[in-house]
Image (cartoon, grey):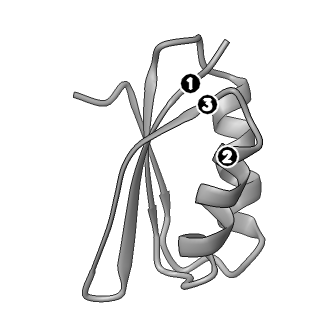
Amino acid sequence: MVDRTLDASGLRCPMPLLKTKLELNAMSAGEELEVIATDSGSARDIPAFIELSSHQLMSSSEADGQFRFVIKCGG
């Protein structure tokens, strides 16, 4: 079960990524954030950001033009 959900549907790049970063900054280590986005750039941008951060991508999926990511907040 995720601790927070960020619905970035309808937002264009780079807003889903920026809002994801802000949300993660406000969270504690170990909490999980679900991000929902409709911008196809998110499928590339969010995992690339996670690779360079202390956070962990728990899952990602795409269905009907909607991208979902579950991110575990790092320390």
Instruction: Left or right? Give the position of 65 relative to 11.
Output: left
The residue at 73%/43% (across/down) is 21
Q: Secondary structure at mark 3?
A: loop
Left or right: residue 45 compared with residue 70 = right
The answer to which of marks 1 and 2 sits earlier in the sequence is 2
Circles 1 and 3: CB atoms closer than 8 Å? yes
Q: Which residue in the structure is indicated by mark 2?
A: 51
Between marks 3 and 2, how big is the CA–CA gap? 8 Å
Q: In screen coordinates, is 45 left or right of 66?
A: right
Task: Mark 1 vs mark 2: give the one in front.
Answer: 2
Against 15, residue 35 (above or below) is: above
- Quick one: 5 or 62, which is closer to the camera? 62
User: Residue 68: percent from the left, percent from the top?
Assistant: 37, 61
Q: Is residue 19 above or below residue 65?
A: above
Quadrant of the frame with the C terminus: top right
| Viewer-side residue, 60 vs 35 | 60
Q: Residue at x 74, y 35 (%)?
A: 53
Specify the quadrant of the image occupied by residue 52.
Answer: top right
Query: What type is the residue that disc 2 sits on?
Result: Glu
Could you say which quadrant of the image residue 14 lies in?
Answer: bottom right
x%, y% of residue 9? 48, 72
State the residue position of label 3. Answer: 55
Residue type indicated by callout 3: His
The local secondary structure at tag 2 comes to helix
**The quarter of the displayed image where residue 22 is located:** top right
User: What whole-number distance in Å separates the C-alpha atoms at marks 1 and 2?
Assistant: 13 Å
Q: CA distance from mark 1 to mark 3?
A: 5 Å
Taking depth in this image into account, of 69 and 6 the one nearest to the observer is 69
Helix, strand, or loop for circle 1? loop
